[in-house]
Amino acid sequence: MENHVVLDLNYIFPIIIIIFKLKLMKNYRTIIVEDERLPRLSLIKKLEMYHPNIEIVDCYDSYETALYGILRYRPDIIFLDIQLQGHTSMELLRELKESIPLPHIIFTTAYSNSEYLLQAIRFAAADYLLKPIDVTELAQALHRIQLKDQANEMPVCFPENEKQSFRTLNGILYAGKDEIAYVKANGNYSHIQLMDGEEIILERLGNIETKLGEKNFVRAGRSILINRNLIYKIERKHKVCILRTPTGKEMHIDLSAGGIDILEKSL
């Protein structure tokens, strides 16, 4: 009687996708900061098995050795456990930020609460992976780093009505330029006000401005982008810009005197 091998397609397809993405990715140098031996060895094995383009420069299990090694080797990516013995990864990042531009950060942690997630966002984390790290999620995180680097290296031009993709806390938001009323910066992330709701976006305002373009959006100061097609009224006395959506809904935006000047000159 012949033996038949049954392939689990739910397992095979993610692996195929990973291999395909590997062929497109450039080389990166990485450092792993993890104070537990088994998670550290597991991550090393997954990187070596599925991501030969990722060079593991070194691994560290303490705040002091990690600080020294990162400053010495200047990696492209840091896999960083949020909790280190006697310290937090945030302390390490604050110390590094005083000396060098932060590389891509991928937090690895057993914690899934919002406090840790928001701390990660503040330091422009490339991703936030829960232990045990899933192979497919690891590949997706590394692929997003490459996409981010590609976006920073060259300007991207989009068709006028094409929906843009934005990373959110829960996944990806797809929205067209005519669906966005305004965008406000908040540190390393942004709030996008849609016609029917609001989303937190894990991107800086400058990156969003590049996606949306100057034709449809005006930057009325350091921290806000406004859809110029929705501007209904500018009240200089009260320093307020009023937007009106196609359904007649009005949105009031408080601006500085300089922001009001920018709006008036751009219209």
Image (spheres, rainbow, N blue to C red):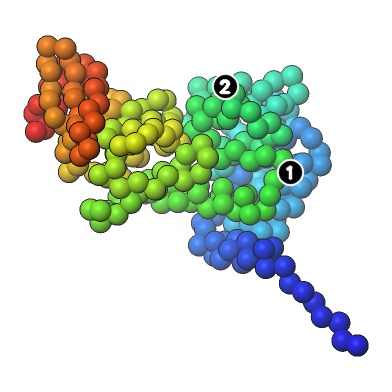
Residue topped by disc 2? 95
The single residue placed furthest to the bottom in the displayed view is 1
Residue 128 figure quarter: top right
Answer whether residue 206 is visible to the viewer in this image.
no
Residue at point 74%, 52% (across, down): 45
- For the residue carrying disc 1, how many other residues have a C-alpha within 10 Å: few (<14), some (14-19), or many (20+)? few
Residue at point 66%, 59% (across, down): 50
Instruction: Tell which tag, 2 or 1, sits nearer the viewer.
Output: 1
Instruction: Locate residue 179, reporting x and y percent.
Output: 29, 42
Work out whether mark 2 precedes mark 1 in sequence or the reverse, and give the earlier one: 2
Residue at point 43%, 29% (across, down): 188
Callout 1 amino acid: Pro
Q: Quadrant of the C terminus?
A: top left
**Quick check: 236 above or below 180?**
above
Which element is circle 1 on? loop
Instruction: Locate residue 30, reporting x and y percent.
Output: 61, 44
Residue 67 figure quarter: top right
Left-right relation of 249 to 48: left
Q: Quadrant of the N terminus?
A: bottom right
Residue topped by disc 1? 132
Answer whether residue 91 is visible to the viewer in this image.
yes
Which element is circle 2 on? helix
Which labelled disc corresponds to residue 252?
Answer: none
**Quick check: 189 above or below 6?**
above
Instruction: Locate residue 70, reporting x and y percent.
Output: 61, 34
Instruction: Locate residue 239, reporting x and y percent.
Output: 17, 15
Cα–Cα gap, marks 2 and 1: 28 Å
